[in-house]
Image (cartoon, rainbow, N blue to C red):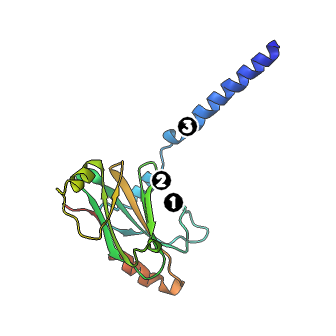
């Protein structure tokens, strides 16, 4: 009986240690998705990410068939806006927080069509918006974020690789950032 209690105690202690290690490892890493994405210097502007080549390093785990536009925003500087007319093919937009977690995502399949008009607000800015102290354009898709620092990732899926340059040009016309 005493042996079973020691065995049970060892299993419980081992489980606790295991959980602590699993939960603290991500906090100890020096390179995160945020630091890798920050290297593109996409503050308040859309940066077209270079295409992923077969066999080449892919630190952001990107799909080589898609075109990516990246923008870093800080809601402490005010609400952020993402807008553009995107090609008539599949596209999506996602907001990532500093932990690399998607806090919002949508696609053109949600009835948006080709026009992307997205306003990103923190809780205080959303309250001002509700009190009509902030002016926003009609038809703006309003998103509230719990964190101020975010990455916006726009993905385009060209139907053919021959269309890639045209899609990249269209994506480079998109705007992203806070209005000063």
Q: Position of residue 60 (x, y in %)?
A: 51, 60
| Quadrant position of the C terminus in the picture | bottom left
Q: Position of residue 8 (x, y in %)?
A: 74, 22
Pick the front one: 77 or 130: 130
Up-down relation of residue 78 to residue 153 (above or below): above
Up-down relation of residue 121 to residue 54 (above or below): above
Pick the front one: 25 or 118: 118
Query: As drawn, is 122 to the left or to the right of 59?
Result: left
Q: Residues within 10 Å of mark 1 (few under 14, many from 20)?
A: few
Residue that lies at the very extreme toward the top in this rendered image: 2
Looking at the rendered image, the disc whose residue lies closer to the viewer, 3 or 1, is 3
Q: Alpha carbon of mark 3 to alpha carbon of mark 1: how far? A: 22 Å
Q: Tell which circle, 3 or 1, labels the residue nearer the N-terminal end.
A: 3
Residue occupying the point 32% across, 59% down = 120
Report the disc number at residue 33: 2
Residue occupying the point 67% across, 30% down = 15
Q: Using the rendered view, name the quadrant where residue 151 is placed.
A: bottom left
- Is there any visible trace of residue 167 in the rendered image? yes
Query: As drawn, is 60 to the left or to the right of 95?
Result: right
From the image, tell me which residue sits under label 3: 23
Query: As drawn, is 129 to the left or to the right of 156?
Result: left
Q: Residues within 10 Å of mark 2 (few under 14, many from 20)?
A: some
Residue occupying the point 52% across, 42% down = 26
From the image, tell me which residue sits under label 1: 60
């Amino acid at each position: 009986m005493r042996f079973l209690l020691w065995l049970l105690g060892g299993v419980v202690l081992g489980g606790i240690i295991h959980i602590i290690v699993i939960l603290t490892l991500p906090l100890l890493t020096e390179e995160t998705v945020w630091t890798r994405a920050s290297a593109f210097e996409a503050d308040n502007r859309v940066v077209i990410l270079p295409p992923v080549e077969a066999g080449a390093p892919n630190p952001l785990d990107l799909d080589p068939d898609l075109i990516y536009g990246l923008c870093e925003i800080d809601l402490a500087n005010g609400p952020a806006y993402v807008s553009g007319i995107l090609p008539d093919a599949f596209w999506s937009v996602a907001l990532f927080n500093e932990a690399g977690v998607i806090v919002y995502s949508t696609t053109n399949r949600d009835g948006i069509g080709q026009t992307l008009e997205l306003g990103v607000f923190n809780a205080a800015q959303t309250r001002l918006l509700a009190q009509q102290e902030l002016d926003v354009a009609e038809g703006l898709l309003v998103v509230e974020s719990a964190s101020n620092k975010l990455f916006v990732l726009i993905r385009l899926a060209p139907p053919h690789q021959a269309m890639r340059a045209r899609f990249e040009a269209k994506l480079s016309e998109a705007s992203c950032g806070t209005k000063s």
